[in-house]
């Protein structure tokens, strides 16, 4: 597989994780971390289930990867995530020294990789990341669009009752 095919393959695994989140009523965001061609962490959003604001897919995947590698430095890894990371997740990415981040859809309201800020490429930090965006973006964004459409429809139906 070439680089684009590999990125699409691993993003499809992140999409599988996002679908798991959606099935639980969570915002459908998924993440995987790859090290030497092997998936070492998989996670999806669990904020509603856990009632914990920091259980974003990226943070949980980073935690798993650190445990797997027995190191807080994830220097030889790639993070694949279906939605552009928020400021909290971007900070964790920088702190864990992940060198490459690949994401699907942009997040105009909270994205801190390209949309609102460019935290992963800010030279004022002691670590920067290579970033690739828009990998399977339509599929990633479609999951979110459908989730929020369904949520609005459910709220509308409750008001009618």
Image: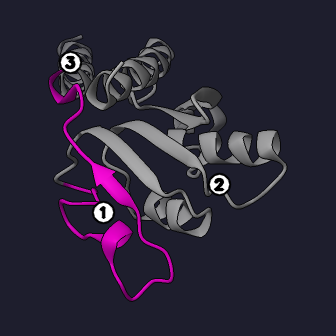
Q: Where is residue 8 in the image (x, y as percent from the top left)?
A: 31, 23
Nearest the camera: 87 or 147? 87
Circle 2 residue: 74
Q: How crowded is mark 1: few (under 14 residues within 10 Å), some or many (20 or more)?
A: many
> Residue 77 vs residue 80: left or right?
right
Q: The C terminus lies in which quarter of the figure?
A: top left
Q: Which residue is drawn at 26% across and 20% down?
A: 143
Foreground: disc 1 or disc 2: 2
Q: Residue 112 carries which label?
A: 1
Q: In the image, is residue 121 part of the stretch drawn in magenta? A: yes
Q: Earlier in the sequence, mark 1 or mark 2?
A: 2
Against 115, is 152 above or below? above
Residue drawn at x 61%, y 27% is: 39
Q: Nearer the viewer, mark 3 or mark 2?
A: 2
User: What is the spatial separation of the Cα atoms under label 1 and label 3, in whole angstroms?
Assistant: 23 Å
Q: Is residue 31 in the magenta section?
A: no
Would you say 7 lies left or right of 114 here? right
Q: Can residue 63 be seen in this view?
A: yes
Residue position marked by numbered label 3 in the rendering:
146
* CB-based contact (under 8 Å), mark 3 and mark 2: no
Magenta highlight range: 109-138
Whether the residues at callouts 1 and 2 have beta carbons within 8 Å, the answer is: no
Q: Residue 154 carries which label?
A: none
Neighbours of disc 2 within 10 Å: few (<14), some (14-19), many (20+): many
Q: Quadrant of the rendered structure where residue 116 is? A: bottom left
Q: Left of 94 or right of it: where is 108?
A: left
* Dot placed on the residue nearer the N-terminal end, 1 or 3: 1
């Amino acid at each position: 597989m070439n680089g684009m095919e590999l990125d699409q393959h691993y993003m499809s695994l992140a999409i599988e994780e996002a679908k798991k989140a959606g099935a639980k009523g969570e915002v459908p965001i998924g993440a995987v971390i790859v090290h030497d061609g092997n998936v070492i962490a998989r996670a999806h959003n669990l904020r509603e289930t856990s009632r914990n604001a920091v259980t974003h897919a990226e943070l949980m995947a980073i935690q798993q990867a650190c445990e797997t590698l027995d190191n807080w430095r994830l220097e030889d890894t790639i993070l694949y995530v279906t939605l552009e990371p928020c400021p909290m997740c971007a900070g964790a990415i920088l702190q864990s020294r992940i060198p490459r981040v690949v994401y699907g859809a942009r997040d105009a309201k909270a994205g801190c990789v390209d949309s609102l800020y460019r935290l992963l490429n800010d030279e004022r930090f002691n670590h920067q990341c290579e970033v690739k965006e828009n990998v399977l973006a339509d599929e990633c964004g479609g999951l979110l669009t459908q989730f929020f459409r369904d949520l609005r429809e459910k709220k509308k139906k409750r008001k009618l009752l």
